[in-house]
Amino acid sequence: MPPPPKGIRRLLVILGDQLDPNQPSLRQLHPDHDALWMAEVVAESRHVPSHAARTTAFLSAMRHFARDRHNAGLSVHYRRLGEHSEETLGAALRKDLPRLQPQQVQVLQPGEHRIQRELDQACNASSVPFEILDDPHFLVTLEAFSTWARGRKQLRMEYFYREQRARLGILMNDDEPAGGQWNFDADNRGHFGRDGPGLLPAPLGFLPDALTQECLRDVAQHLPELPGETGHFEWPVTAEQAQQVLDDFITHRLPHFGTYQDAMWTDQPWLYHARLSAALNLHLIHPRTVIDAAEQAWRNGHAPLAAAEGFIRQILGWREYVRGLYFHFGEAWHDWNALEADEPLPALYWDADTSMQCLHQAVGQTLQYGYAHHIQRLMVTGLFAQLLGVRPEAIHAWYLGIYVDAVEWVELPNVIGMSQYADGGRMASKPYVASGRYIQRMSNYCRHCPFDPAEALGESACPFTTLYWDFLARHQDRFARHPRTALQWKHLEKMDPDRLRAIRERAGTIRDILKRGDRI
């Protein structure tokens, strides 16, 4: 660790998900008077069990960033895993502040309330002024989102998305949306059919360089208990690599992304997806760069409008919207449990040991790569947890730790809100629930499964389908008259009461089996 420069004016804390080399706060630093501070601490991999590949991605991106900033002439105070005993970020900063003696500590807006508290408390303990800066990596400031949300009876992403499109001039022809409509979601629900996706272009990956190999060894040595594998690690860990991943996606997969963005297929983890979420959430690439590339591909005739719009909506729509929601509602997200779910998270989420092929595939590839695309998360792992009635905080902790791209500001609203409906409808107007028939329609998983998605009773009954009808029965009073869910509950009302009673008994048996840790 280098000796502190005399009279540090500003100590800029760089968090592991704030690694944009072009951020204005870096350009404002003077190499003779200011310094960067970064730390690797075990608590960030243990407060929820972090996938070993997730921790490796954070550490490798941080070390590359620190090395490049040092080579550019900035003073960088960097704590590596295993070089100090402090377990938390706040404890590490508290240990260094008396030695560094900065006049001020600054940090970009942290993406997790817990981290902000730790840094604030560390600075208060040393009586050092602490300033939180706006994060320029996002297209909508927290203040602007708060202004947009103020006074609205309901917050809905679609309205937010349209306003941002118009404000930023994205996919617009003068004052009108390109193609005459704002949303092409109806065109983006294709499945592959019986023949499957065919020969897919392999996504660009990167063999671990020397710094990444060091990180892999350090994670294995200092955090050997972490779940997941690292033998397939090839994630981008620098801004240059992130740009290459974007270019590769635009060239080879964006044209078909829209049609097949919701499709799933056995032993095909990537399909037409971009694999850019981790780079975006580490701030290795700016969202406007990604959006502009997708829009240009459409304007050049390389990709259809439905593909470009569907991809852009995930970034300008959901990504910006969920960040606004995270800060708008604050830490209340952790306490919400509108459906009073209290089941434990099944062991299969940690070992993929199940006969249910869809869960075996989605969880298995998650443990292998730290990745699953949005439909595998929402309509396989998330759907099963919701139908089963898993405690929201338990499934949230799993998602936050197990995916390489997970940061709390984006993960928590998506899981508690969209996936589990634990927020009571603040994020999504209805619960995303379906039987095994949905998975059958959007994948080939059911072909390789002993369970029949059409059956809710009997030895071959699909647990998803059994639990689906049980979910409808458990929450009939809440949703039977909901304008967007009434049809599902009308089907329930037509069911023979004895059959429904038997289905609910079978659902209870499934819960008992999973609570015992037995295989299903």
Image (tube, rainbow, N blue to C red):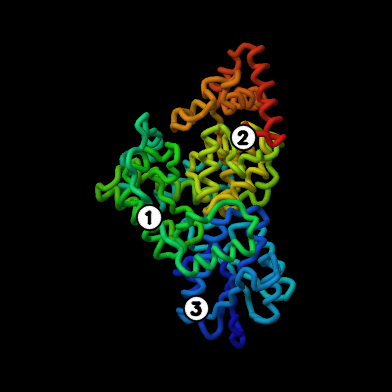
Where is residue 392? Give x, y as percent.
66, 41
Which residue corresponds to the image point at 60% horizontal and 20% vertical from the top-left? 459
Quarter of the view holding residue 285? bottom left
Q: CA distance from mark 3 to mark 1?
A: 28 Å
SS state under label 2: helix
Where is residue 286? Give x, y as percent.
43, 60
SS state under label 3: helix
> Which disc is residue 204 wearing?
1
Which residue corresponds to the image point at 50% horizontal and 57% vertical from the top-left? 281
Q: Amino acid at mark 3?
A: His
Q: Residue furthest bottom?
A: 6
Q: Would residue 292 be seen by someone viewing this image from the given angle? A: yes
Pointer 3 residue: 70
Left or right of 214 in this view: 506: right
SS state under label 1: loop
Q: Nearer the viewer, residue 331 or 261?
A: 261
> Which disc is residue 386 wearing?
2
The total of numbered circles placed on residues is 3
Tell me whether the residue at label 1 lies in contact with that at label 2, contact meaning CB atoms closer than 8 angstroms.
no
Q: Using a 10 Å C-alpha cutoff, classify the residue at mark 2 as few (fewer than 14 neighbours), some (14 to 19) or many (20 or more).
A: many
